[in-house]
Amino acid sequence: MPSNAASPRSIDRARLDALRQNEDRQFLSRTRRSQALCQQGLRTMPYGVPMSWMAGLYRTAPIYIAHGSGAYFTDVDGNAYLDFNLCDLSMTIGYGNAIVADALAHQARRGTQFLLPTEDAIEVTRMLSERMGLPFWQFTLSASGANTEVIRIARLMTGRRRIVIFGGHYHGHIEETLVRSENGQTVPDTAGLSPGSAAHTTIIPFNDLVTLEQTLSRGDVALVLTEPVLTNCNLVQPSLAFHEGLRELTRRHGALLCIDEAHTLQFAFGGLTRAWGLRPDFVTAGKGFGSGVAFGLYGMSHAVAECFERNFDSDVGPRGIATGGTTYASALAMAVAKAVLEEIFTEDAYQHLSSLGAQLADGLDAIFKRRGLPWTAFRCGPRSGFCLEPSLPRTGDESANSLDAELIDARRVFMANRGIWDAVLSAGPQVSIAHTSSDVETYLQVVDEFLGCIAV
């Protein structure tokens, strides 16, 4: 949960509150057309938006967008924003990318979907296999859908029901993972879930191999599901021994392992699965490879694929594993995936992301030191952020100390008023392929100005 953990010696809370109120007034004065459209939208849409997150991820009033290009988008009031949130990483390639636009237009003229495969599917899955090491692939509409299908397959293969996830997790809007720990119990974390949604999910601390082994030794775990780095509670890096121990323990106790790369596929070429030499049974991904087009996918080992094929679900035969969907793996999704893999997410592009990400993290560390703040920067590939502690966290609970809602909200509206769109509460700024070194320096200059207004 968000906290207000920054040391009183670091942040003047009275100045922070006064700054926020002033910046809120400026924001409202700059976005009058958006406010008017939101009022119109209230007649037909809850909160005045077509998807509730658009009104809930930021504490400022929703803004309506006119267009985007490269690393910028522009609202209907004519305000341009240098984007360091990237639509929660679903726009890592930047706005208006010509390669994706051409792929979309070409395939749309030929047919967006057929409920049958196109040749692009063969090339896309071949490239995925080469990059990530998993030999077989299936597509969905989102990483949530991919994780849902992986859980079902793992339960069938093992004959078990329980899944294990780690504190600080987010694996999509699915019942088994929309859970939290409360008084030693796993309970639903949001409204509207079925009463039994948390009954077969265990949450343990990240990097805790002792607790993991104790949990797996009970013999009822079908699947361990984790990101390689936790990315939805800022960033939590694994210890040196964590992933090797995770793989060894799951195999020893007969559980399957899934690495969720919905975010981290964009952290390194082939994802962190390739970069760190991980050996999971499944990999899941989503965010449309950062293209803005809706698709997700999952890779599987030979053994999983054999089970998958033995339990084929067909309308004209015996019922098997509940996988698939009418618009999954469309011709349009395949055309975009092929274009992104072949022409955009090259090794050179990932080097560009890594270089800018290091510049961003190094710059934040330099600002913290110059301002006398006992903080450090999160860093992993293109992602950075504000750790309000001198040492980086090892668990989701420790990372929550840096989710200071008052500080983050004030920073975001301050930066928006100066032409920068910052990250969502639980994440941190991230660079895109469209960003430049100069863009990173612009972000850092505004951060320095913000901290100068509130630091003691």
Image (cartoon, rainbow, N blue to C red):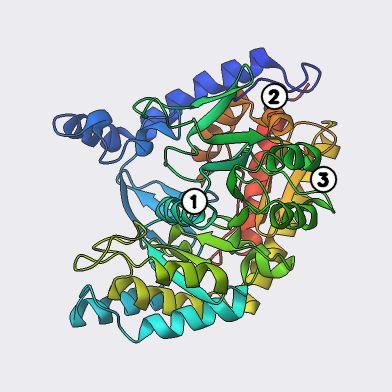
**Depth-wise, is mark 2 or mark 1 nearer the camera?**
1
Give me the disc on residue 155: 1
**Which type of secondary structure does the marked residue at label 2 adopt?**
helix
> Looking at the image, do the residues carrying marks 3 and 2 touch, with CB atoms under 8 Å apart?
no
Name the N-terminal-most of marks 2 and 1.
1
At label 2, the amino acid type is Ile
Q: Is residue 357 above or below residue 40?
A: below
Q: Nearer the viewer, residue 394 or 318?
A: 318
Q: Is residue 345 left or right of residue 28?
A: right
Q: Residue furthest top?
A: 14
At label 1, the amino acid type is Arg
Q: Quadrant of residue 345?
A: bottom right
Instruction: Report whether residue 343 is seen.
Output: no
- Quadrant assignment for the N terminus: top right
Give me the disc on residue 454: 2
Residue that carries the numbered disc 3 in the rendered image: 366
> Looking at the image, do the residues carrying marks 1 and 3 touch, with CB atoms under 8 Å apart?
no
Label 1 crowding class (10 Å Cα cut-off): few <14, some 14-19, many 20+? Answer: many
Instruction: Report whether residue 67 is seen.
Output: yes
**Residue at x 46% of width, y 57% of height:** 153
Position in image of residue 12 (x %, y %) = 71, 17
